[in-house]
Image (cartoon, rainbow, N blue to C red):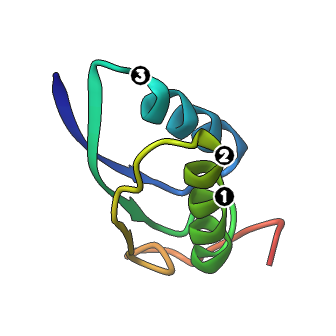
């Protein structure tokens, strides 16, 4: 079994990948870290929690990370 920590911005493509990883029997997700990307960090966290709920599996811990990039302004179409 592979043990993973997933670092994501949980936009639509990442939310699907997260669902797939949660449902994969050979993978155990130790934790999920959320960072701002295509959406705000708070929206990304909500997306991750909904993905986990929809997967209907175990609930890995979710940690909120950076709310903006280190070296540039954060730009998003979804404020």
Quarter the N terminus occupies: top left
- Helix or strand or loop: what does disc 1 sit on? helix
Q: Nearer the viewer, residue 37 or 3?
A: 3
In this rendering, the answer to whether 27 lies above or below 19 is above
The residue under label 2 is 54
Is 75 in front, or is 60? 60
Expressed as whole percent of the image width and height from the top left, the position of residue 49 reads: 58, 62
Read off the residue under disc 3.
24
Judge by depth and name the residue closer to the eye, 69 or 46: 46
Gap between marks 3 and 2 measured at Cα: 14 Å
Label 3 element class = loop
> Where does label 1 land, which residue?
50
Q: Earlier in the sequence, mark 3 or mark 1?
A: 3
Q: CA distance from mark 3 to mark 1?
A: 17 Å
* Quadrant in the rendering for residue 75: bottom right
Screen quadrant of the C terminus: bottom right
Question: In the rendered structure, are the residues bearing label 2 and label 1 in contact, judged by CB atoms less than 8 Å apart?
Answer: yes
Image position of 51 (left or right of 65)? right
Quadrant assignment, res 12:
top right
């Amino acid at each position: 079994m592979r043990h993973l920590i997933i670092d994501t911005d949980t936009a639509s493509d990442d939310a699907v990948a997260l669902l797939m990883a949660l449902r994969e029997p050979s993978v155990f997700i130790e934790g999920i870290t959320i960072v701002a990307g295509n959406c705000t960090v708070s929206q990304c966290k909500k997306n991750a929690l909904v993905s986990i709920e929809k997967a209907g599996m175990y609930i890995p811990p979710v940690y909120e990370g950076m709310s903006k990039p280190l070296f540039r302004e954060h730009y998003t179409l979804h404020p």
